[in-house]
Amino acid sequence: MSRRREILRRAAEVFDRQGVANTSIEDIAKAVGIKREGVYYYFKSRGDILLEVILPSSTTLLMNMKGVMRGNMSSMEKLHGAIQTHLNAFNPTYLEMSVALREEHFFRNDAKLSELRRVWDEYSQLWIELVEEGQEKGEFKKNINAKMSAFAYIGMCNWLARWYDPAKDVPIPELIETYFTLASSGIGINE
């Protein structure tokens, strides 16, 4: 593993454990086993590190969601695919996704994060379009707000970052099916 990648990985671990606001460059350097100047050789600031931790996972999530939306599937199948895409992002990159979803507010006004905001805005818009498409096709209820529904689905998926521990909790495929059932039909029994 290159030194740069090691810094990013250790930073993600420290951010996840302590939160970005409570993490210093010194904390990251200590986790890597180098001096603070060694971190500054690769990164100008904690914000640059945070961006590099979050942006790749976020961009991959967006690209995968675009693939779901381009698929020749029913809207219900796309909903399943969207949930699957989002929750599968926690599998190999759990720390990065966890940090991304918990620390989004940290640099909310930072111009450097405009690309990240663009990615998240586009991702959210695709969920809205998915709900609207399902409503137009008659697969989803028309009397609910598409944006509110999309944000509810995203929020449900994002909340995983607050409680999920891949070593202790149910496997991701089981979560996908549970979340899809909740999203598609709720928990009430329809007779």
Image (cartoon, rainbow, N blue to C red):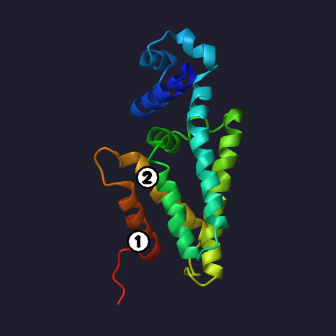
Q: In the image, 187: left or right of 153?
A: left
Q: Which residue is under mark 1?
A: 181
Q: Nearer the viewer, residue 95 or 4?
A: 4
* Among the two numbered marks 2 and 1 on one chain, the one whose residue lies closer to the N terminus: 2
| Residue 152 seen by the camera | no
Q: Nearer the viewer, residue 33 or 98?
A: 33
Name the spot of residue 10 as percent of width and height, x first: 46, 26
Q: Which residue is under mark 2?
A: 159
Mark 1 neighbour density, 10 Å: few (under 14) some (14–19) many (20 or more):
few
User: Residue 148: which numbered mark, if any?
Assistant: none
**Secondary structure found at label 2:** loop
**Residue sitting farthest toward the left:** 168
Residue type at the position of mark 2: Trp
**Secondary structure found at label 1:** helix
Mark 2 neighbour density, 10 Å: few (under 14) some (14–19) many (20 or more):
few
In which image quadrant can residue 144 be found? Answer: bottom right
Q: Nearer the viewer, residue 12 or 103?
A: 12
Location of the C terminus (image quadrant): bottom left
Vertical placement of residue 110 versus 29, above or below: below
Which residue: 60% across, 40% down?
A: 56
| Residue 67 seen by the camera | yes
